Amino acid sequence: MGLGLYFAEGEGPKFERALQHEADIAKLQVPDMEKLQYVFDAVTSIRKALITACRLSASPAARSHSPAIWSKAVAAKNSAPSKP
């Protein structure tokens, strides 16, 4: 989109040119969505895999709660140290 995206180590994504004025928004380049199809395909694939994983590893009662809460619970369960 012409903002000069780069990744700063230990900080994450940054932009060389920030949007500060309305004119900056007008200068944005609209990306060719066909060239980005691989991104949409990856997000769709990951989403389906996560939904399947959650369905396979939880009871119906657990799945009825908020997806955010459920995600945290699964992460906590998977990162908890196993008992001898």
Image (tube, rainbow, N blue to C red):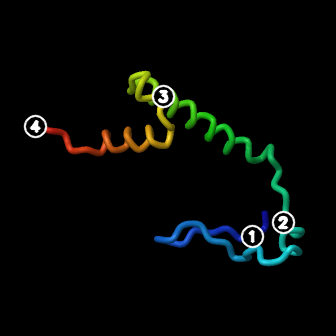
Residue that numbered label 2 is attached to: 28
Q: CA distance from mark 1 to mark 2?
A: 8 Å
Task: Give the amino acid type for the residue marked by disc 2 in the picture.
Answer: Leu
Task: Give the amino acid type for the residue marked by disc 3 in the picture.
Answer: Ser
| Mark 3, secondary structure of its residue | loop
Q: Which mark's residue is nearer the viewer, 3 or 4?
A: 3
Q: CA distance from mark 4 to mark 2?
A: 57 Å
Q: Are marks 4 and 1 in contact (CB under 8 Å)?
A: no
Q: Which mark's residue is nearer the viewer, 1 or 3?
A: 3
Residue that numbered label 1 is attached to: 3
Task: Give the amino acid type for the residue marked by disc 4 in the picture.
Answer: Pro
Q: At 51% from the left edge and 71% from the top edge, which residue is drawn?
A: 11
Where's residue 10, x and y in %? 46, 71
For the C terminus, the quadrant is top left
Q: Are marks 1 and 3 in contact (CB under 8 Å)?
A: no
Q: CA distance from mark 3 to mark 2?
A: 41 Å
Question: How busy is the neighbourhood of tag 4: few (under 14 within 10 Å), some, or many (20 plus)?
Answer: few
Say which label, 1 or 2, has the lower sequence index: 1
Say which label, 4 or 1, has the lower sequence index: 1
Front residue of 38/40: it is: 40
Question: How busy is the neighbourhood of tag 1: few (under 14 within 10 Å), some, or many (20 plus)?
Answer: some
Q: At 21% from the left edge and 44% from the top edge, which residue is drawn?
A: 81
Residue that numbered label 4 is attached to: 84
| Mark 4, secondary structure of its residue | loop
Front residue of 59/48: it is: 59
Q: Which mark's residue is nearer the viewer, 3 or 2?
A: 3
Q: Are marks 3 and 4 in contact (CB under 8 Å)?
A: no
Q: CA distance from mark 1 to mark 3?
A: 41 Å
Q: Which mark is residue 64?
A: 3
Say which label, 1 or 3, has the lower sequence index: 1
